[in-house]
Amino acid sequence: MAINARSLLAKVCGETRVFKGRYLVAVLLIGIIFGIYKALQFSPLEQELIGKVKVNDRVTLYITEASAGATTDFSYRFYLGEASQDDKTFMASLEDGDQPFMITTDKEALKKVKDGAIYLSVKGTIFTYHSPAFYRREGVIYSVPVYLTSSPF
């Protein structure tokens, strides 16, 4: 009878260990998946609104200063957004993935806005540039002409 009880106890303990092991593997797998998801969502890029210029009745040019940390230089990002939105709404749209039409190292790139067009003159590096610049308003895509001159220094 003692042998049967011991073997029964070993069998029960063995199944319990297998159950705990499976539970542990499932928890670790969920933790790894969550960690990968968070790592992909993490962006050290911080942006601060430094300029805002009305282009026309429907669109505003927004300029942000972006920093990715202490070891990187500032970059300046040029966006188009609805003229009716406030600054907080615009900054929230950046978290939704709105993309700039230009990224540069030149803080003074904007020269003027005239007759619904944007005039830029960059002295430095241009990392990204798209012309014409597009923006979305009430589901419709509009464009704004951008005139750019640049030099490396």
Image (spheres, rainbow, N blue to C red):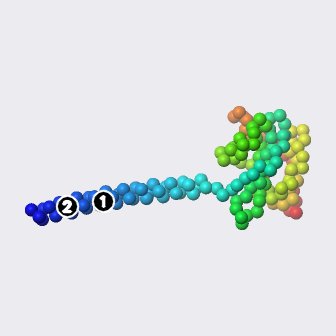
Q: Residue at position x 84%, y 60% from top?
A: 124
Q: What is the residue that sits farthest to the left in this orientation? A: 1
- Camera-side residue: 13 or 62? 13
Classify residue 117 as left or right of residue 12: right
Classify residue 41 as left or right of residue 91: left
Pointer 1 local density, CA inside 10 Å: few below 14, some 14–19, many at least 20 = few
**Earlier along the polypeptide chain: callout 1 or callout 2?**
2
Residue under numbered circle 2 = 9
Figure check: 132 above or below 35:
above
Residue 105: x percent and y percent? 80, 59
Can the viewer see residue 98?
no
Q: Residue at position x 69%, y 47% from top?
A: 94
For the residue marked with disc 1, what is the amino acid? Val
Q: Secondary structure at mark 1?
A: helix
Looking at the rendered structure, which numbered label has been put on residue 18? 1
Residue 117: x percent and y percent? 86, 42
Residue 125: x percent and y percent? 81, 60
